[in-house]
Image: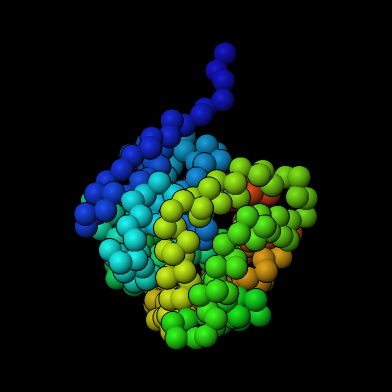
């Protein structure tokens, strides 16, 4: 009698521009590839259950950015923490692993990192899974706009950023907007806060937060790429996201009228509560569009 198929997840590192980058990998090497790009303040661990659900059929690769998770985290004096440089490392990561044809899962920080990669290498991108990954001004809530206002030279900006790097706020990002908070495991926010509390990690997050405003200037470029390339796109969005509300999901349809949109009664970390509904959608999407 055959039992359930559970993929083996490998935990590896690769050197990119002198930095040790950690990543998780599962699935057949010759299967369609999905590059999983995590958000703030998380890491590749946020995709573990999704990898379990899909890793028997698809090739899944989930890196940690520098300054996150298990990847090397030099101080801001040693590495220039900006979204451009995170994209530089991701580009080098793909080159090191020979990833040159894949769909991208873009969530939160994964959207500005991933869309930079896409505009540099449009030939690499075979499709998009967008989960609360914003690329439109209407996708910014008042809370998000207040966060974006924190930038170098603004009085009190660093203190405002440090105020959100607490266990209470981290937990709130997971449970906020959830229809059933009991479906949201405590492991995610506990792991995130563990990494945030490591020496030097908060300084890294301050640098990135103060650079977030630079992403808004790139929105027109990313939207132009979407219109020109028309990548097959699945949008799965937690509509109760305090940072990136529902209009940000619907805005993609202006540039991608053929995109599939699914809204869920949950918050920012939609996979935490809605994996049973979202994983089959991703499997169906990849099965139809990635050959």
Give the colour scheme of this rendering: rainbow
Residue at image position (56%, 51%) is 193
Closer to the camera, 286 or 73?
Answer: 73
| 162 versus 51 height, above or below | below
| 259 versus 269 height, above or below | below
Q: Position of residue 86 (x, y in %)?
A: 35, 64
Closer to the camera, 185 or 203?
Answer: 203
Quarter where residue 269 is shown: bottom right
Q: How many marks?
A: 0
Residue at image position (57%, 74%) is 160
Closer to the camera, 269 or 238?
Answer: 269
Q: Which residue reaches farthest top?
A: 1
Q: Position of residue 258 (x, y in %)?
A: 54, 69
Q: Is residue 282 in view?
A: no
Closer to the camera, 166 or 147?
Answer: 166
5 relative to 211 in the view: left or right: right
Q: Position of residue 177 (x, y in %)?
A: 73, 61
- Quadrant location of the N terminus? top right
| 111 versus 223 height, above or below | above
210 relative to 78 in the view: left or right: right
Q: Position of residue 87 (x, y in %)?
A: 34, 65
Residue at image position (60%, 59%) is 166
Quarter where residue 125 is shown: bottom left
55 relative to 18 in the view: left or right: right
Residue at image position (50%, 86%) is 154
Q: Is residue 28 in view?
A: yes
């Amino acid at each position: 009698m055959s039992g359930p198929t559970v993929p083996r997840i490998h935990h590896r590192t690769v050197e990119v521009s002198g930095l040790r980058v950690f990543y998780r990998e599962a699935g057949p090497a010759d299967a369609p590839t999905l590059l999983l790009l995590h958000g703030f303040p998380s890491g590749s661990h946020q995709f573990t259950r999704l990898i379990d659900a899909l890793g028997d059929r698809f090739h899944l690769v989930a890196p940690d950015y520098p300054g996150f998770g298990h990847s090397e985290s030099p101080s801001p004096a040693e590495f220039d923490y900006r979204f451009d440089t995170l994209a530089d490392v991701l580009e080098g990561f793909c080159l090191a692993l020979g990833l040159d044809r894949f769909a991208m899962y873009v969530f939160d920080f994964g959207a500005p990192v991933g869309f930079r990669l896409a505009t540099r290498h449009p030939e690499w991108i075979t499709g998009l899974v967008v989960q609360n990954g914003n690329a439109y001004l209407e996708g910014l809530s008042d809370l998000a706009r207040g966060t974006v206002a924190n930038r170098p030279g603004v009085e009190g900006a660093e203190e405002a950023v440090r105020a959100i790097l607490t266990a209470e706020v981290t937990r709130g990002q997971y449970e906020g907007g959830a229809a059933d908070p009991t479906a949201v495991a405590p492991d995610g926010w506990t792991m995130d806060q563990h990494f945030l509390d490591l020496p030097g990690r908060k300084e890294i997050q301050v640098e990135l937060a103060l650079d977030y405003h630079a992403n808004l200037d790139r929105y027109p470029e990313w939207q132009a790429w979407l219109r020109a390339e028309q990548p097959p796109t699945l949008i799965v969005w937690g509509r109760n996201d305090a940072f990136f509300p529902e209009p940000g999901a619907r805005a993609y349809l202006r540039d991608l009228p053929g995109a599939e949109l699914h809204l869920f009664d949950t918050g920012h970390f939609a996979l935490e509560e809605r994996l049973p509904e979202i994983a089959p959608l991703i499997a169906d999407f990849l099965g139809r569009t990635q050959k």
